[in-house]
Image (cartoon, helix red, strand yellow):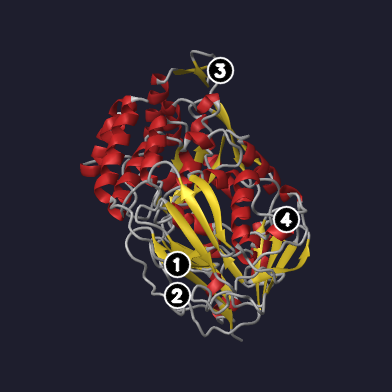
Amino acid sequence: MTKTRNALTSLSFLFAIIATPAAASVGAQHGLAMHGDVKYPEDFSHFDYVNPDAPKGGELRMAIVANGYDSFNPFVARGIAAAGIDTYLYDTLLVSSDDEPFSVYGLIAESIETPDDRSYVVYNLREEARFQDGEPITADDVKFSFELLTEEGHPRYQSYYQDVSKVTVEGPRSVRFDFSGAVNRELPLILGQLPILPRHYWKDRTFGDNGLDKPVGSGPYQLGKFEAGRSVSYERVDDYWARDLGTRKGRFNFDTITYEYYTDDTVALESFRAGNYDYRVESQAKNWATAYTGDAFDTGKIKKEAIGHKRPAGMQAFVYNTRRDVFKDPAVRRALAYGFDFQWANKNLFFDQYTRTQSYFENSELASSGLPEGRELEILEPFRDQLPESVFTTEYEPPSTAGDRTMRDNLRDALTQLRAAGYAIEDGTMINKATGKPLAFEVMLFQKTFERVVLPFKNNLRKLGIDVSVRLVDSNQYAERWRTRDFDMTVGVFPQSDSPGNEQRGYWHSSSSDQDATRNLAGVRDPVVDELVEFLIGAPDREELVKRTRALDRVLLNGHYVIPNWFLASDRIAYWSFLKRPETVPKNGADVNNWWVER
């Protein structure tokens, strides 16, 4: 065990002793907050951000831009799952509210039992909980689901729930999970997010080979009509067992929800304007600024809204695959970032709609800023000899051309840094002097709209003798290469919540670096990051969680694993006017599953 590990482990252990009281008698709770108390009381009738009197009926039609789907199983790494399948068909033990940092309330589970130290959790299931074929949901189904997903499911389940040491069925409707390792206050909440699968359905089937067999879930919708790879519909379950619960009242109001697949977003947009589907989330700034015009908009038949939200923006970025030799040196990664001119792109391509991302936890109190001080500095200090000096001495800012700064200035700095890293320009080509190899890499994309962003980046780096190629692949090929890490650089998104925790292992921990299909796109493999991820997961209260997250943020930023892109603190949506939404918008933003039809 290293000196650094000893220092942090001792600090964590001491903090846990001070902050965590001895386990007391455990009572059943209707809800559980990550830190502090839940907002909604027992037997609450509905969430504040829904309309409990919303009428049921009508159809919601949406679009997906992709090359189809080939599976109704969203829980494995193989295949392309149909849009919406996990959202509409499968219930979970608990559900989160959208107007709290991280609180959960019972759905399949009627109550939760967990001690103050959260070393285990018991879920007591509702007697009325049913699968869509009428079979009751039992504790055996819960245990079966956990074991199936962590052993045969997507690798994220194993990473997410790795601190579960034992699962015990205590009765037909009672199941207990025991935890091992360090303090992990989040586990009782995130285990509640486990989709519950019917054991009786899967007993004679191979989990990864179900293809387009009709699945059996327990959620508000069941699979309806579908045309393989082209469209899929979900039909509301009239006798849905949870329809009157406070966690479901006012939600899932459409009789039918249909996704139509398009291979081109321009075609999809025109189809929306023609009335072929009803609700669209716009991801392109140019479209938002120029394409939502015409009679339907002038007369109010189609509404266009930018609905503000207060959820963390996370990180969208050009991601370096540090498993490749060309990107192993962080100094090289740092230098290449000077070739991306966000200010130019925002003005000329995005109509000045975006803000530059400067944190992995952007748009939240979890984002680091300035220099570390106080508790943040205390957390980082044991690692000082293992971290870049810049973590302690320089506020992180991505390269910029704001003010008097120009791209020529940036490229001059990039050249200086590359020379210091052992590179030189020979006959117009940037060469690694130690190996004689040129500095060259490929950017993999599946969205053609990103080409106009990447090509100026390519052209800027070409002035330094760096050969950047851009490869546009279809969505299926992209998914496979993404899963197997077969790329040099790509566009990646690392979404974050108000309460980061176990999912950070899948993003940054060494244990996820060499696994296919994890979210560790960059191949981060750093013992300091590993320590900080585990320390974050064990945060005993909100204040400490914020400090530990900021410390991790600083280390990731100074590792130069990505070139940050941009974010928008609103949801750009357009919809036909017969769709109605609640007046109250929670901090997490617009959710069409709270909407309804009114003609």
- How far apart, in angstroms, are the residues tagged by discs 2 and 4? 34 Å
Q: Quadrant of residue 486?
A: top right
Q: Which mark is residue 339?
A: none
As shown in the figure, which amino acid type bears the numbered disc 2? Phe
- Of tags 3 and 4, the one toward the viewer is 4
| Helix, strand or loop under label 2 | loop
Q: Amino acid at mark 1?
A: Ser
Could you tell me the amino acid type at mark 3? Lys
Q: Closer to the camera: disc 3 or disc 2?
A: 2
Disc 2 designates what residue? 47
The quarter in which the N terminus is drawn is: top left
Callout 4 environment at 10 Å: few (<14), some (14 to 19), or many (20+)?
Answer: some
Mark found first going from the N terminus, 1 or 4: 1
- Picture quadrant of residue 158: top right
**How far apart, in angstroms, are the residues tagged by discs 3 and 4?**
52 Å
| Mark-to-mark CA distance, 1 and 2 | 7 Å
What percent of the width, then of the height, locates residue 178? 47, 50
Q: Earlier in the sequence, mark 2 or mark 4?
A: 2
Please indicate whether residue 542 sits to the left or right of residue 104 in the image: left
Look at the numbered discs 1 and 2 and tell me whether their residues touch, using CB distance below 8 Å. Answer: yes
So how many labels did they put on this image? 4
Q: Which of the two marks, 2 or 4, is nearer to us in this view? A: 4
- Which badge, 1 or 2, comes first in the chain's sequence? 2
